[in-house]
Amino acid sequence: IIIICIISIGILFTAILTLKNYHLERLTSQLKSNALLVSRIIKPYLIKGDPSSIDYQCKILGKEITTRVTILDKKGTVLGDSKEDPNKMENYTNNSEIKQALTKKIGVNLRHSNIFKIDCIYLATPIIENDQVIGVTLLSLPLNEVKAKITHVYNIIILGILLVSSIALGVSFLVIKMINKPLQDMSSLVKAIKNGNLTKKTKIYSRDEINKLADIFNQMAKELKAKIQTITEDRDKIEAILTNIAEGVIAIDENERLILFNPTCEKIFGFSKSKVIGKYFWEVIRNNELNNLFGEVIEKGETKKCEITLFLPQERTFEVHISSLKRKEGLGGIIAVLHDITDLKNQEKMRIEFVANVSHELRTPLTSIKGFVETLKDGAIDDPKINRKFLSIIEKHTERLNNLINDLLQLSQIEFKETKMELQKTNLKELVEEVLFDL
């Protein structure tokens, strides 16, 4: 038992350390990608020396990547921050990650944040122009997500240790009892003879019988281990599916209490699983339409499908499927799956706007062509100078229509991944003058 406990504790600490390192590496990689993106966006404003635009961009970017963004100049002075007023912030030169960034390296540091009131990971990357560091991009994220996942794994491992220890204790007791039983019987017989009881008999255990009992016990332990392993694997598979699935999954028992709340639901509703399991669903889900649907399915056992919009913690649109969980005894609760269709809705809106814009772009040259044709028909065709000029304009607008149609075909090919985009340099001055002339 002691050896099992020592091994279990070793596995526990190894798993926690490995999990922590994995999540820190994943967060660092994510921060590096975001830092490079932020640096590319901020660099033009930094070159211009426009701190107000830098601070404005920081606040926009911070919301988009859900990360605190801070921009510093090469002296460590804060030029922009997504959370605070840069004019009230102290100089960051003494921070180790900033020192590394100022030497053209990527700096990473873990320390306590006075803003988040929790341990955070900080990553600083240099902003370089002409092989010189002109500023630093500093990103920071709280480590509460990493700690939550480590705590979850810690609880699972502790449960496993307790289970294995309990089984080991029971097995030890049975083995000791089987080994000591013949000796106890012999001792009882000796005491009976000593007290004058000559009629007492005891069952003599042969080595074969002990082996048979050992074989039975070994088979029982093997079957028990196999069943536990099967249960554990099934539980891990279900947990892995629910953890990694993109849809939110909610299960409610017949008493209207939450019994399942996967990680996607935690993000959708802004509540952690540990705080909502066991509560009534209407205490957690602040949406009357969704709560009414849950109530109807619990009451009638029907399947429901609808679209709803949740406004907190952020506005998102979901396609919701709600089904009843039926048992032999009757209704056992309901399960709901929430599929995020916000992006699909946004794409649909963009397509509508795109069609409107294309219609406008097509209407402009067509109107011009029609006007010049009518002018030519009214007599201008007899004037060689005018008709040539008008025909040239009509030809130009026709070419514009042709270009628009080609652009639409290219956009269609890009959307269906039939072609690759090629970036080319464009003279913006000529492009603007051409558009103004067409107007």
Image (spheres, grey):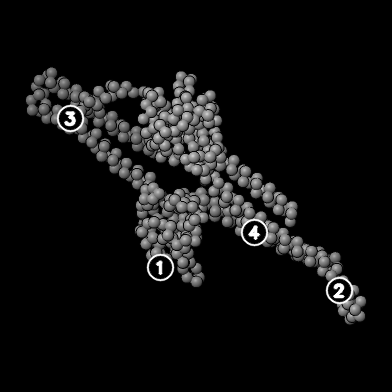
Q: Amino acid at mark 3?
A: Ser
Q: Amino acid at mark 4?
A: Ile
Circle 2 packing at 10 Å, graded few (<14), some (14-19), many (20+), is some
Residue 169 place in picture, x, y as percent: 72, 61
Sooner in the amino-acid sequence: mark 2 or mark 4: 2
Sooner in the amino-acid sequence: mark 1 or mark 4: 4
Q: Which residue is mark 2?
A: 188
Q: Which residue is mark 4?
A: 228
Camera-near label (2 vs 4) is 2
Separation of residues labelled 4 and 3 (CA atoms):
79 Å
Camera-near label (3 vs 2) is 2
Q: In the rendered structure, find residue 7 and report the number of the disc placed on it.
A: none
Residue 306 place in picture, x, y as percent: 36, 56
Q: Amino acid at mark 2?
A: Ser
Q: Amino acid at mark 1?
A: Glu
Q: Find numbered disc 1 in the image and state the secondary structure of the residue it sits on.
A: helix
The answer to whether residue 221 is left or right of residue 363 is right
The answer to whether residue 193 is left or right of residue 261 is right
Q: In the rendered structure, find residue 299 and report the number of the disc placed on it.
A: 1
Q: In the rendered structure, find residue 368 and report the number of the disc placed on it.
A: 3
Circle 3 packing at 10 Å, graded few (<14), some (14-19), many (20+), is some
